[in-house]
Image: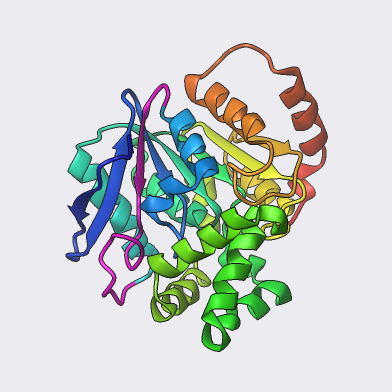
Amino acid sequence: MQPRIRYAITVDGVSIAFWTLGKGEPLVYMAGGPWGHVELWDIPECRRWYERLAQERMLVRYDIRGTGYSERDVSDHSLDALVADVEAVVDRLKLDRFDMFGAFDAGPVAIAYAARHPEQVSQLILWCSWARSSDIRSPRIRAWLGLIDQDWELMTDTCAHLALGWPAGEVGRHAAQRLRESVSPEAARAALEAMGTFDVTELLPRLEMPTLVLHRRGDGLAPVSHGRHVASQIPDARFVELEGVDHLPFVGDAEAVLAEVQDFLVGSRTPNPRRRRLLTRVFTGIADSTP
């Protein structure tokens, strides 16, 4: 059954759309933006991903301000504003303690929220993310961003296929259409410009909750070195480097991602030989790695 969309109001009066799925310990899922869209439920791969995450807990998913079913007419896309979006949903659901999942450019927002509300965040998961957004603005990314003013349809098509893979076919076309429905070119430009200034590097050492940093080795949009750097700066963070090139967790070997997420969230004490090999390899000299 498709989740029912509800709304929360931020401290600055912005209406934020969200839904929940499943029962149990809450997991607040932050997919970043300005592409987040709660209606991605109708993409089969995405729906299965959400359903699996919600099997043993309550999954909370929301649209950031300016996108999807959240209020579109907004001017503030700052880090503080995006943290306020999370605060509104958490307050609306009256969540005292919860786990948090921050993917891609939602990573800095999740880090900022966790640093400000350590009493609420039980465990933190970061997926293919970074601490300083300017570090990932490669010439390739800057060229893609330039398409906003030149060819909006090409820009969103390229975004969908970069995330889902060029062989995605009909799924990629459908995802691109969803992107165009979820945000206007003007809002996308404003949000992306603001997000490009985010820098939470100084907050990383303040994170004391158990933290899992997941990254795919071949991710072309967010190089794995950024994940290593983030993990090296968070006290006692667990870093797992997974095989693959896909930017989205539910594309490619989603089962491997789910296994790591589930094991971390339930706090399993059972040794994982594959993780031990990865950690041994990755953390050899990680203190000297830089993004």
Q: Residue at x 64, y 71 (%)?
A: 137
Q: Residue furthest front?
A: 170
Q: Nearer the viewer, residue 137 or 2?
A: 2
The reply, left or right, for residue 179 in relation to residue 72 is right
4 over 258 or under it: above or below: below
Front residue of 73 and 83: 73
Residue 134 x/y as whole percent: 60, 70
Residue 250 image offset from top left, x and y in percent: 58, 41
Main SS type for the magenta part?
loop
Q: Which residues are magenta?
A: 55-76
Residue 116 against residue 182 in the figure, above or below: above
Residue at image point 57% right, 57% down:
131
User: Is 255 situated left or right of 6 in this image?
Assistant: right
The quadrant of the rendering that contains the C terminus is: bottom right
- Membership of 59 in magenta stretch: yes
Give the residue displayed 52% in from the left and 59% down from the top: 174
